[in-house]
Image (cartoon, helix red, strand yellow):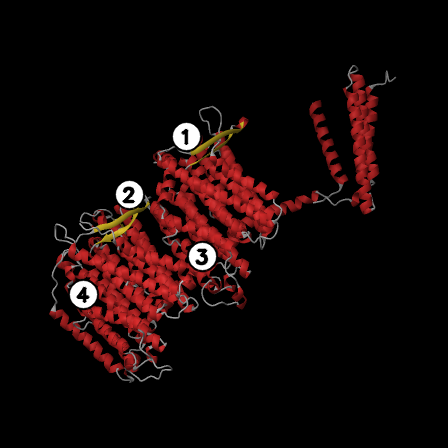
Amino acid sequence: MIDFSFTALILLIPLFMFVVLGLFGNRFKPLVSGIAGTTGLFVMWVLSLITAYMYFFVLEKAVDGTFQKFLAVNMRWLTLTDKLHIDMGVLLDPISVMMLIVITTVSFMANLYSIGYMKGEKGYMRFFSFLSLFSFSMLGLVVATNIFQMYIFWELVGVSSYLLIGFYYTKDAAVAASKKAFIVTRFADLGFLIGILMLSYLTGTFDFITLTGPDSPAFTSGQGVWFLGLSTMTWSMIFIFMGGAGKSAMFPLHIWLPDAMEGPTPVSALIHAATMVVAGVYLVARLFPIYVSTPVALDVVMYVGAFSSIFAAIIACTQYDIKRVLAYSTMSQIGMMMFALGISGYGGHEGLGYMASMFHLFNHAFFKALLFLGAGAIIHSVHTNYMNEMGGLWKHLPITHITFLIACLAIAGIPPLSGFFSKDEILAAGLEKSTFLYLVMMIVSGLTAFYMFRLYFSIFWGKQTQYEHTPHEAPKTMTIPLLFLAVGALLTGLIPFSNFVTSDRLPFVAHLEIWVAIPAVLIALVGMVIATLFYRKENNLPEKVFLALGGFSKAAYHKFYIDELYLFITKKIIFNYISRPIAWFDRHIVDGTMNGISFVTNEISFRIRKFQSGQLQQYALVFVSGALFLALIFIYLWTN
Amino acid sequence: MFEGVPLQWFLVTGTIMFFVGIYGFLVRKNLITILMSIELILNSVNINFVAFNKILYPGHLEGMFFTIFVIAVAAAETSVAIAIIINIYRRIVNIDVEKMNEMKY
Amino acid sequence: MSFLTLFIIIPLLTIVGILLCKNHLQVKWVAVVGMSLQLITAIVLILVFLAERRAGNMAEVLFVQDNIWYETLNIHFYIGVDGVSVAMIGLTALVVFAGIFASWDIVDLPREFFTSLILLASGVFGFFISLDLFTMFLFYELAVIPMYLLIGIWGSGPRHYSAMKLTLMLMGGSALILLGMVGLYVNSAPGGGPLTFNLIQISKIHISIESQRFLFPFLFVGFGVLGALFPFHTWSPDGHASAPTAVSMLHAGVLMKLGGYGCYRVAVFLLPEAAHQMGWIFLILATIGVIYGAFGALWQKDLKYINAYSSVSHCSLVLFAILMFNQTALTGAIIQMISHGIMTALFFALIGMIYGRTHTRYINEMGGLMKVMPFLAVAYVIAGLASLGLPGFSGFVAEMTIFVGAFQNADVFHRVCTIIAASSIVVTAVYILRVIGILLLGKIRNPAYELITDAKWHDKISVVALIFGITLIGLAPLWLSDMISQGLGPIMQKLLAAAPILN
């Protein structure tokens, strides 16, 4: 057995960087803090790669041929009851090691990129310290040994996301977006918390190894019908999924993600595309054995995933802000991952969906981060977010152009780029489960190809736009991450993923299903061709189609009015009909009663005080009469 | 000297003096006369003390002592009161008791 | 002579020192020295206590001292501490220490101000170390009365009204407490023998269920008034809004904890069966308080009102947890008291500092303060994040312990209450972020604020000390929760013994 306790360093380095940069950052020159932060992340990246290498290739497998699942580090953090305690530690298993690679790679790339991208921004060191905080929290989340540790880091990622979205804190839109992101995910986290409370009450443990082990208490307890015909365990898993749905921007908790694009672009790439938003997928994957034992909860995951996927894909086709298009695309892709988990079974080839989902997560991280960083490079050079203000950029930004194209091909699922492989597995798994959902996913694939190339052509080709300043290629610190990630997007699909990450940690061989692959590629090509026709050269086709679809396209452009609905509920209903009456009730009824009591007391004493006239003789008269009166009474009593 | 004078006579005298004092205290407006009324009340009590002591407990002296105390206290009280009255007069140039209602409410 | 007496002696000596001072600066420094000593003593106490426990000294209360005070009524000066009171003393010392620095800029009558403040503090310390109901009550009153002067003289806004309201409502509460305590006293020797106020002795006897049922509401409501039990919480917004900074800090941070502590230590501990029987009524009130305070805070525009309602919500959570009657929830209740104490003290300190610079407390009149006073703004954000229960700060530890504990009660009623109470974390997030968004972020709306300066050295000491407290508990809560949880042994025994009688 190899000692993996060094993995704790992967967590501690970014924490240390955060503290140092946060407290003393303003003592350094800005560039120093950027380089320091990046160096820290580089060390972390190397350590993760070492961990992954040792875990997958050096560490001997367990007796039954599975990858081991064990605690590399574990210490008690808080004791709650005699059974329940929160530990802090590092859990290593295939998915957590995979996530380590994803997070540290993208984190490192985003950091490196930010050195150039954020140059001259105010709060340079603040940015890097927050990035370190984020890396720390995200890593803590994926290596969590128990569900409560996961919840703790879950909240911490939420706050780092809040801080980073609101990085430009003088911009009202950024402030509002950060607030929205935090509150929506917080609401989802309430579900997560309730789910944890229920689960831990039923099973008497937080520990992942116990919970997901072969004889987990979760399989036996809480099976009785509780509410709406579902068992307690099912409900608790649905509640937990609510947390995951909030973080992963699943419908209807997705509203924060597009707005979150107000943050700096490296942040969008790192947090809102590659790592944090897939936390929900990771959560479901982490608790997958329990989800399999509660089929209804797993169906919820599947339907929510499938619906979000197509919903977001439709909206993505109508947006003009390139980052928003990417945001909806992220939502759509994550929906696919959720869907893949939802259709999956446990163990062996049954678990194809699970494997596909993780595979897609892995690939998606690379190409989506690449897309965002590319978008950042474009925005950096043309100073606008809107694709209708761009065009013909291919000659100004050659490197960005090439890498962006690679990413678009990857996400569209064109072989042999990475997206093709994972999407193929998802579709194959979907077809085994239900033809209808398979068709939905096919449509999503087509739409994905369409809107990505719509984006691509509008930015790099399309109309010839005159720019105020001639756009220029980004500096090296920005192009190197682009190139690196492009290589990733090209190659990660070739990894035989089912050898490493499977639902029961037992490697199996997944074949490329040709008869699934061909239609998938075809529909992607169709999407690309349509996009080419519409956007390669400036023409009025898109407008015609937009108008032809009438109300539907308008609704899609307005994101199906979900934001308005939320605003209505929160601003109008909660503020006006709950909070305001409560404030009024408190001031007027509760406090009014208290004031009323004092008013009555005051009034009575005001009346009584008239007796106190200040006239000495009046007092004396009362006194004498009283004395006489008493004397008479006593005389009367004594004489009788 | 007072042999044969019945107790009732003293008591009647005392009572009359007492109520004259009370009457004066209640109706006179001049602080000095009010003070005088108080003296009357005190002295009526003194008469009672002395008379009771003499007739009911001939061998004892407590009543007498008490009378002396009362006289001493009355003297002290009067001097303080007059001092107050003089001060009041200096302040508001009046010693009408009805004008002095600052301490109401 | 137990060294706990130091907690009374140091403040009294400090007061004497202050009275001997010649000028304002001396007054402040004497106060600082006194309260620093107090803080050091508190830290020493915590360390010594932990060492004793580790050495295996499992006595119910440690460092006991027992002097007869008034023999006729068998009143003793009986002091001692367990894990819970040690924690509360630590909290008080920290908040008072920070409070001295936060009121550095006081101009009017500083001598009298610091005298009252420290007198108040000594009352609180006395309350936490007393084990005799009579001295407990005495110190309780000692803590409440200076409040009237502090708000009435150094307050702002409708200060006379607020001071009067606060004092009257708290006095009303203490009348109920006195009644309850006398009731306990006359019931304290059911088998004959001398009556006693001794809390430990009373806890050993069994009070008849009828008397318990009679006394419990008096004690619980009486302490509940101070612990912001709905609907007796309305003194809190007005009182806090009018009070000067350090007083708000001490009041919300420490004095309100007297309520929760009393509910736990006197009402529930001594009357467990009645607590079991009547707990549900107060549980409903507490649950209402949690959510109601949070929603109330959502609508307010005055920073201090926001924080006062938030305090109502958080303090109701303490009562809520106490009424869950299990070890985890009770531990959570105590941690919540400490956590909320430090947090809210930090909030009020910051509000005071912000008010001192902008001369307004209305959030709509401010904006973009992050730019001009980064230190205070960052501290405010930290306080806000701690308040909404972010992991890494104490609030999270407390809330999670409470919720996990509360969830151990499996029946529907408790479940529903727990879920309602837990949903307050969302509302809390909303109002905290709303304030942060309007107050600190965005553009500076009032050009006059461009010239505002950031925190001075004394502000920084105050703020840093409190933030240190929050993060210490938030990052390493195990020692605290173990210490508290051990201290809860006796009450749990009584509660467990009481439960089967009813079922």
Q: Which residue is mark 2?
A: A83
Residue shown at the point (51%, 49%) measured from the top left: C99
> Callout 3, which amino acid?
Ala
| Residue carrying label 4 | A426
Residue A74 lies, in percent from the top left, at 27, 48
The label shown at residue A266 is none
Looking at the image, tell me whether mark 4 or mark 2 is earlier in sequence order: 2
Task: Kindly report which numbered mark, 3 or 2, lies closer to the viewer in this rendering.
Answer: 3
State if disc 3 and disc 1 touch (CB < 8 Å).
no
Q: Which chain contains the residue that carries disc 4?
A: A
Image spot of residue A563 (x, y percent): 36, 67
Sort mark 3 into few (<14), some (14-19) or many (20+) by Cα contacts within 10 Å: some
Disc 2/disc 1 C-alpha distance (Å): 29 Å
Tell me the crowding category of disc 4: few under 14, some 14 to 19, or many 20 or more residues within 10 angstroms, Cα based. many
Single out the mark in the foreground, 2 or 1. 2
Please name whichever residue, A89 or A1, is drawn nearer the observer in this view of the structure: A1
Please give the label number shown on residue C204: 1
Q: Chain of mark 1?
A: C
